[in-house]
Image (cartoon, rainbow, N blue to C red):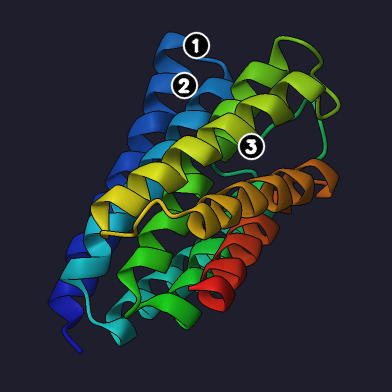
């Protein structure tokens, strides 16, 4: 295990998060916007890092950020990712979601990358779309957005990893998309950052 590699990734992410905090404070960017930027970027960065760090290094970085976000949330250190307008612990659940993906699918890049893409893009954009309809509750429009983005991302993953578009695999694609959308819809307080990747990774491992 290389602590140098861990430090590179950890320090890089800390610079990014505190950079967002600076932009939030300096230019008055809304917390929901900087929070979504952090959400999307963090999960996307987790994909190439998956190929850079060893299993132990990857989990070590995630354990550090689990502790970091628990502290940051309890002390309200990062207002750029902490929402005052509604009760949510999504920033704490988020590294737990990635930790679970790594725990069960670190060596299965099809499962890990697909789960991270859905966590990053489907979940974040569903929240962005839903926000313009209703701030305090999940919306049908947000769920529809989540479903179609998940279908698209699964199709992209199929192509990237050479999964044939057979009738059975298309059924799997639609089933996983429906299941993930349902899980996202019923998960309160930002817990979808854990429940969605758990559901997607579990179904991919089960079906493939």
Circles 2 and 1 in contact, beta carbons < 8 Å: yes
Image coordinates for residue 81, horizontal then vertical, percent? 56, 36
What residue does disc 3 label? 82
Mark positioned earlier in the residue sequence (1 or 3) = 1
Apparent side of residue 47 relative to residue 98 in the rendered image (left or right): left
> In the figure, 170 relative to 31: above or below?
below
Could you say whether the residue bearing mark 1 is in a helix, strand or loop? Answer: loop
What residue does disc 1 label? 28
Circles 1 and 3 in contact, beta carbons < 8 Å: no
**Rendered residue at 13%/75% (across/down):** 4
- The residues bearing labels 2 and 3 have C-alpha atoms spaced at a distance of 11 Å
Image coordinates for residue 72, horizontal then vertical, percent? 58, 52
Task: Name the disc covering residue 24, or none.
Answer: 2
> In the figure, 16 relative to 134: above or below?
below
Image coordinates for residue 8, horizontal then vertical, percent? 17, 63
Mark positioned earlier in the residue sequence (2 or 3) = 2
- The residues bearing labels 2 and 1 have C-alpha atoms spaced at a distance of 5 Å
Apparent side of residue 118 relative to residue 146 in the rendered image (left or right): left
Could you say whether the residue bearing mark 2 is in a helix, strand or loop? Answer: helix
**Rendered residue at 70%/17% (across/down):** 131
- The residues bearing labels 1 and 3 have C-alpha atoms spaced at a distance of 14 Å
Would you call the spot at circle 2 few (<14 residues within 10 Å), some (14-19), or many (20 or more)?
many
């Amino acid at each position: 295990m290389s602590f140098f590699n861990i430090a590179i990734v950890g320090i890089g992410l800390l610079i990014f998060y505190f950079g967002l905090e600076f932009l939030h404070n300096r230019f008055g960017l809304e917390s929901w916007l900087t929070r979504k930027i952090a959400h999307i970027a963090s999960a996307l960065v987790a994909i190439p890092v998956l190929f850079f760090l060893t299993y132990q290094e990857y989990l070590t970085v995630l354990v550090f950020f689990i502790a970091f976000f628990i502290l940051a949330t309890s002390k309200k250190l990062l207002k750029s990712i902490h929402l005052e307008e509604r009760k949510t612990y999504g920033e704490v659940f988020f590294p737990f979601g990635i930790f679970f993906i790594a725990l069960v699918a670190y060596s299965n890049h099809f499962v890990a990358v697909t789960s991270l893409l859905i966590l990053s893009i489907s979940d974040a954009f569903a929240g962005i779309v839903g926000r313009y309809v209703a701030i305090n509750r999940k919306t049908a429009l947000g769920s529809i957005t989540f479903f179609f983005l998940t279908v698209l991302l699964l199709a992209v993953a199929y192509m990237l990893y050479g999964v044939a578009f057979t009738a059975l695999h298309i059924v799997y694609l639609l089933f996983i998309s429906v299941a993930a959308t349902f899980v996202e819809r019923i998960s309160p307080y930002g817990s979808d950052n854990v429940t969605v990747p758990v559901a997607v990774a579990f179904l991919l491992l089960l079906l493939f």
